Image (cartoon, rainbow, N blue to C red):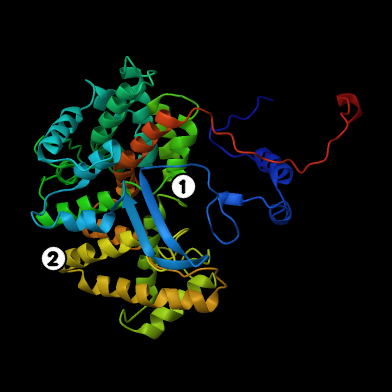
Amino acid sequence: MAEEKRAWNEVTPELERLAEETYTASHVEPSLYEEYNVQRGLRDQNGKGVLVGITNISEVNAKREIDGKSIPIPGELFYRGYNVKDIVRGLAPDNHFGFEECTYLLLFGKLPNQAELREFVRLLSSYRSLPPNFVRDVIMKKPAENMMNSLARSVLTLYSYDKNAEDTSIPNVLRQCMQLIAMFPILSVYGYQAYRHYYNDDSLIIHRPKPEYSTSENILHCLRDDNKFSPLEAKLLDVSLILHMEHGGGNNSTFTTHLVSSSMTDTYSVIAAALGSLKGPRHGGANLKVVNMFADMKKHITDWTDEDQISDYLRKLLHKEAFDKKGLIYGMGHAVYSLSDPRAQVFRSYVEQLSEEKGYQKEFELYAMVEKLAPKIIAEERKIYKGVCPNVDFFSGFAYQMLNLPMELYTPIFAIARIAGWSAHRLEELCHGDKIMRPAYMTVLPHQEYIPLSER
């Protein structure tokens, strides 16, 4: 009897059985981490990161040593020594767009003067195009349902178009990084347009970026069928890009950038690896969880101003009785920050402004209510070693909703911002890293005597 044909991506009962054996072989008893003092997740039991590198690019502070004691402080984020709050505040006098200026700061370690910024913006604009027929031959062929995979595939394919792809000299890597920074918005948006055409049967509309537009303006220009957007919409997206573009060397995707760069592989492989890290829901996909959580909350709360109803729902979340039943209030808490996330604080005012422009005041008030209640409820329900505060993901998904951005692009927009930080860290690793990163793992399985196949 001929063997039954199966789809290549089908999980069969046989694979299910083998998976159980894999789990049995791969499971490590959690108590062993404590017994052997293994810092799982590169963090100790108090949440402090294990020091594995030194960087000049950015600094994340949540504590300060005072009289030999570690005292929690309001969160601080510095780019090349400049407080991010001061950077965003500095854009206000003439209300200019700041993502390009901050990218210059991360790459070259200083704030540009007007002439330097003009030249840098001109150079980025010249790179904001794809190789001939790339859209047709790569992006339009078999679009992925997840835009992060489309973006990673495009990045890896660009390797084939680069005659100097393997050259890891600093000038060449800088050129590659600047090109990727410029290309990420159109790679992401075009990937989405192909997806919605083939999967949703929508019209296929491809707009060319405008050389005079900033990164945030071009995202909205290329994404929207009518090309239209308000100044506040573009400004909020620009601030979002600034706040997401860098966050120290210890976040998962940036550490991946250092780790893979230390092997001296090519730029495209490094950035594709970082994209794979950022795609994970524990990293770049968190704002999607926040948006979906609030959608579920709205279904179960009749009065968005009733603190008792909202508190009851939040407790149900923690008790695994609501939403995805994972026991989490998404958008609350951070691996480092305890008293406040400076990114959330800066972003909040712009989100409030846009809610007024767009008529989303009631939704913003609901977010504000959860922002106030959730830390208190978490403190009452959970034993926590540090305070809990709203993180930047708490507001970013709501902001993207008001911008009418498709949810498929939420994480790619994070990548459009973070590619600037990844690029700076890749260059830093190549400039001073002279060894491959190779952390230690210990084995807890006892040795066994080999048994011949015929005797098993």
Image coordinates for residue 234, horizontal then vertical, percent: 15, 51
In the picture of the structure, the residue carrying the numbered disc 1 is 250
Q: Is residue 387 visible in this depiction of the protein?
A: yes
> Considering only vertical position in the picture, is 142 above or below 43?
above
Image coordinates for residue 181, horizontal then vertical, percent: 27, 35
On residue 357, the disc is 2
Label 1 packing within 10 angstroms: few (<14), some (14-19), many (20+): some
Question: Residue drawn at (50%, 76%), measured in percent from left and top?
Answer: 379
The mark lying in front, picked from 2 and 1, is: 1
Name the secondary structure under disc 2: helix
Q: Is residue 168 left or right of residue 83?
A: right
Quadrant of residue 133 within the rendered picture: top left
Name the secondary structure under disc 1: loop
Question: Residue drawn at (59%, 56%), measured in percent from left and top?
Answer: 44
Q: Is residue 9 left or right of residue 117?
A: right
Q: Earlier in the sequence, mark 2 or mark 1?
A: 1
Quadrant of residue 392 within the rendered picture: bottom left
Quadrant location of the C terminus? top right
Tag 2–tag 1 contact (CB < 8 Å): no
| Cα gap from disc 2 to disc 1, whole angstroms | 37 Å
Q: Is residue 391 visible in this depiction of the protein?
A: no
Quadrant of residue 60 within the rendered picture: bottom left
Front residue of this view, candidates 265 and 298: 265
Amino acid bearing label 2 = Glu
Quadrant location of the N terminus? top right
Image coordinates for residue 453, horizontal then vertical, percent: 86, 25
Question: Residue drawn at (37%, 57%), measured in percent from left and top?
Answer: 287
Amino acid bearing label 1 = Gly
Image coordinates for residue 93, horizontal then vertical, percent: 9, 57
